[in-house]
């Protein structure tokens, strides 16, 4: 690490500790030439994959865009922001764990629909209507009927 005072290219680490958020390491250093002490912060650089849209366009994965979509689907519903943040975090971690450079938007949409289906049926249908691009009331009713049919099935315990 280059010394900010004299520019010498080498230093030694005196102390290391994680930041309060536990997402970075703060290092206290000393220049080997002028003995000036300074701090650096080291954190993991997360490179988000590109999302391949239905029309073939590519854009970087944006967790905030995902959150906006979830908030819109859950508007005026009894769903906490914490629950939505957990969904975004789970989806983001799942994408990063795979390590793929590109992810189909369809995969993200299906993950969101699964999460909303377990969380709130109305939010699920709202999201599905936009995500699946319902063309008419028949498609909307078909999705509702499927939802009702699955709701009436006995659960395995």
Image: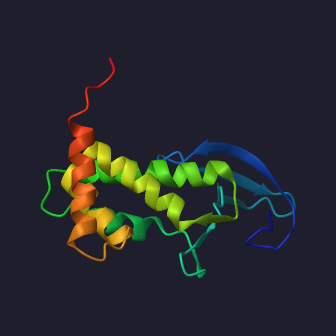
User: With 22 as the anchor, is 139 left or right in this view?
Assistant: left
In the picture, which quadrant includes the N terminus? bottom right
User: With 127 as the anchor, is 27 left or right in this view?
Assistant: right
**Does 120 sit above or below residue 137?**
above
Q: What percent of the width, then of the height, locates residue 147? A: 25, 48
Which of the pair 77/96 is nearer the observer?
A: 77
Q: Is residue 88 visible?
A: no
Q: What percent of the width, then of the height, locates residue 66? A: 41, 65
Q: What percent of the width, then of the height, locates residue 135? A: 30, 77
Q: Residue at x 22, y 55 (%)?
A: 144
Q: Residue furthest top?
A: 157
Q: What percent of the width, then of the height, locates residue 11? A: 82, 57
Q: Is residue 35 visible?
A: yes
Which of the pair 55/146 is nearer the observer?
A: 146
Q: Residue at x 86, y 57 (%)?
A: 32
Q: Residue at x 21, y 61 (%)?
A: 141
Question: In which quarter of the view is residue 128 placed?
Answer: bottom left
Question: In which quarter of the view is residue 55 placed?
Answer: bottom right
In the picture, which quadrant includes the C terminus? top left
Q: Residue at x 74, y 62 (%)?
A: 36
**Does 117 sit above or below residue 134?**
above
């Amino acid at each position: 690490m280059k010394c900010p005072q004299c520019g010498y290219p080498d230093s030694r680490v005196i102390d290391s500790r994680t930041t309060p958020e536990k997402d970075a390491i703060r290092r206290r250093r000393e220049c080997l030439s002028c003995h000036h002490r300074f701090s650096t912060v080291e954190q993991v650089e997360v490179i988000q994959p590109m999302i391949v849209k239905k029309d073939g366009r590519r854009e970087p994965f944006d967790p905030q865009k995902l959150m906006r979509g979830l908030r819109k689907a859950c508007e005026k519903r009894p769903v906490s922001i914490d629950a939505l943040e957990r969904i975004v975090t789970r989806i983001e971690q799942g994408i990063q764990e795979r390590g793929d450079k590109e992810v189909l938007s369809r995969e993200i949409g299906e993950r969101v629909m699964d999460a909303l289906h377990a969380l709130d049926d109305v939010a699920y249908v709202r999201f599905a209507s936009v995500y699946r691009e319902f063309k008419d009331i028949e498609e909307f009713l078909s999705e509702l009927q499927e939802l009702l049919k699955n709701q009436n099935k006995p659960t395995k315990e």
